[in-house]
Image (cartoon, rainbow, N blue to C red):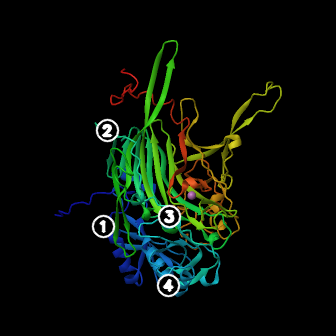
Amino acid sequence: MNFQTPMTAAHPLSPLSGDEIKQVAAIVRRDVENGADILFETIELAEPDREVVRAHEQGTTSNRSAWANVYHHTRPGVTRCLVSLTNDAVVSQSYREDAQPLISAAEFMGIENAVKSDPRFIAACKRRGIDDLTHVTCDPWSAGNFGFEEEKGRRISHVFCWIRNSELDNHYAHPIEGLNATVDISTQEVLVVIDEGDVPIPRAEANYDRTFQKVVRDDLKPIDVVQPEGVSFKLDGRRLTWADWDMQIGFNPREGLTLHDVSVAGRPVLYRASIAEMVVPYGSPKGAHPRKNVFDIGEYGIGRLCNSLELGCDCLGAIQYLDAEINSLDGGVETIKNAICIHEEDMGILWKHWDFRLNRTEVRRARRLVVSTIATVGNYEYGYYWYFHLDGEIEFEMKATGIINTTACEPGKPGLHGVEVSPGVRGQIHQHTFCARLDMAIDGDANSVVECNTYADPAGPENPYGNAFRQHETVLETEKGAARKADPSTHRYWKFTSSDRTNHVGGKTAYKLMPSSTVTPFLSPDGPSGRRAGYTFNDLWVTKFDADQRFPTGEFVNGSDGSDGFPNFTSQNRPIVDTDIVAWHVFGLHHQPRPEDWPVQPCITCGFKLMPVGFFDDSNVRDLPWEKNAASCSLSEST
Ligand code: NI
């Protein structure tokens, strides 16, 4: 008899466990050429087809597979391996010579140290009066693809430099303008040191660290979030349920937080949702600044840069955390404790009505479920907040905080493309342009997309008083036809409709996407940065589901030429009616820095909403209990 205990079946969309990551690394080392020297860019779950996920829900155990992107420092390119954990084998491997791996956080300090050891850089510092380089910092930016001869075939980082006045001092207050270097990340060879201009280094301090706060205000009393009976959500493994909502919480090193199989009231809405890319282009044509056009997700991997969140600081109230396990370069495991935060928030009133004839009031309070994570990319923090509301609305909010990227200028002369935030310290105009990948599943996998625009009716006998206006609906039939811009003048939005279900008035059940944070791109589409940021030139793209189309900039972004991703994803112009569609929504922040963003930027936000429209037969929230919050008190009089 066989007394082997069957393995507990992980949900097929659960991220790889630490043990699974180690197993993948061991298989790859064993089965891929020169395995001993391999570096592991990414080890992540190979998400199975949805048929497998559905079969799991019916009780069938599924196989576990992983993607491993691996490389060697001694040769260019990346080998992409599909690994079966179940069969303990590499299933397939393909080598792409032109691909470059993500820049790993583990490589950041190596880049800085290489630059600071270079005699040309040391001489450039000396020319600026810096003899001791201890407090000089070099931020390792991705370098783009500018076609410079010495960079061809190499994996490059391009650095910008600052200096601290003392150990805890905010170095971004002291930019070393005109001093840059390019480094081969693999060999740590410094290729070029650029030392130009004579802009003085601003040395006035601008600190936010608590050590420097001489006066701390004491006029704010605590606000506590108290949930005496516990929380209303339940987490079972990675399955999160709350009110009518049900979803799986995923995570991967590149996108960070992902959501899967999101349903409300037992009906599917989204098969998968993530923020799949962002790009941050800066607007200055001067010096080395045109190189600043960084794809934080595709070039670094935002999941690997997630913070360990702190109770009572990042998160208030009764908090459920999830850890994230990611691979290290050597195939080991790094655990980010408390990477994902799950909690509930009061949201003011949900609905209210006073019937003045009856003098009766009905009011119900709103609350939302929040699933969030925060990543640090160099000087910036990005807070990802997914909100689930009681009325079926899904909302995403991005909070950008941290420290603006600074450059130095002659005091009083910031030039055309920036703002002086402090004497001699300049923030340049820039944008943060995100792309949400939304694999829609409104009441099933077969969906269509409808564009809704409101126009005034023409004047005439049918519109005698000139007041008529109405909504026009157009089904977007093909991928190229669904590459769309927002249009506030027609209150344009897009509706994702079910092919299988209608509501009680005969309409197709649907959710609408409200584009509320669109960003006008200013990059030339033909320039070295613009042609790599093709996705930013529309606010909506819709594609027929294709498992290989995961990222709007393609699988490998570092040093890419822009030929992968959008607009090429739509080149086949596939039909997108009554089929499995993926919506890609582009949104973001247009950011002309303010002095108020300095020295630490209070959160600025952008996002979008997915709102049920004819998905339910009515407002669906009458059944909330009538109640008064007993912990509330009136300060004006006793009630
Ligand atoms: Ni910004």
Judge the density around disc 1: few (<14), some (14-19), many (≥20) Cα neighbours within 10 Å.
Answer: few
- Name the residue beneath numbered marker 2: 227
* Image quadrant containing the C terminus: top left
Residue 267 visible in the displayed image: no
The CA span between labels 2 and 3 is 43 Å
Residue 623: image quadrant is: top left
Q: Secondary structure at mark 1?
A: helix
The mark found on residue 205 in the picture is: 3
Among numbered discs 2 and 4, the one appearing first in the sequence: 4
- Name the residue beneath numbered marker 4: 75
Name the spot of residue 547 as percent of width and height, x first.
51, 61
Judge the density around disc 4: few (<14), some (14-19), many (≥20) Cα neighbours within 10 Å.
Answer: few
Q: Secondary structure at mark 2?
A: loop
Q: Secondary structure at mark 4?
A: strand
Among numbered discs 3 and 1, the one appearing first in the sequence: 1
* Image quadrant containing the N terminus: bottom left
